Amino acid sequence: MPRVPALAALAILAAGSAAPALAADWKPFTAPAANGARWFYDADYSYRDAATGRVVVMQAIGKPEAKVGPNGPGAADGVGSVVALDCKASNLLVVASYSPKETPDLTSTAWREGKPKKVGKENAEDAALMAAACAGADGLPSK
């Protein structure tokens, strides 16, 4: 009988050690602002939309020095959005936004019918996200 608790303990430890592999891979794409905030995108969430060819990425704002974000939907400090980038035409569509009080509907495909926003020098964050996320776009899975 002593094996049962030992096996249970090993199962718990194994599950705990697997958790970090499921964690988001937040990569910064802007320099910290004067207040310490900066923008990140989740490289693990990124994929190519099969219907449009756009690169879909989750972005979030965070202040790592203050231990705030970046985080995805549902987190107490998760504030950001999911956007679809057209790397060749340099434009984006907002798929959904989120905050601790707002859960995004990521099942809707209505965003595909939206009017794209041109990305240029006037919006440094969007341009930086496009440069970072599109750099590895050829290797992304298609969904």
Image (cartoon, helix red, strand yellow):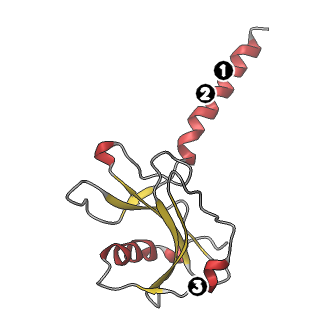
User: Is there a contact, CB below 8 Å, between mark 3 and mark 2?
Assistant: no
Residue under numbered circle 2:
13
The residue sitting at the front extreme is 101
- The nearer-to-camera label among 3 and 2 is 3
User: Is there a contact, CB below 8 Å, between mark 2 and mark 1?
Assistant: yes
Q: Quadrant of the N terminus?
A: top right
Tag 2's secondary structure? helix
Above/below status of 132 relative to 88 = above
Residue under numbered circle 3:
114
Residue 105 in the figure: left or right of residue 1? left
- Distance from disc 3 to disc 2, alpha carbons, whole Å, reads 46 Å
For badge 2, the amino acid type reads Leu
Tell me which numbered mark, 1 or 3, is placed earlier along the sequence. 1
The crowd level at tag 1 (other Cα within 10 Å; few <14, some 14-19, many 20+) is: few
Tag 3's secondary structure? loop
- Distance from disc 1 to disc 3, alpha carbons, whole Å, reads 51 Å
Q: Quadrant of the C terminus?
A: bottom right
Q: Residue at x 25, y 54 (%)?
A: 36
Tell me which numbered mark, 3 or 2, is placed earlier along the sequence. 2
Task: Please state which of residues 49 and 113 is positioned toward the viewer in this rendering.
Answer: 113
For badge 1, the amino acid type reads Ala
Tag 1's secondary structure? helix
Residue under numbered circle 1:
9
For badge 3, the amino acid type reads Gly
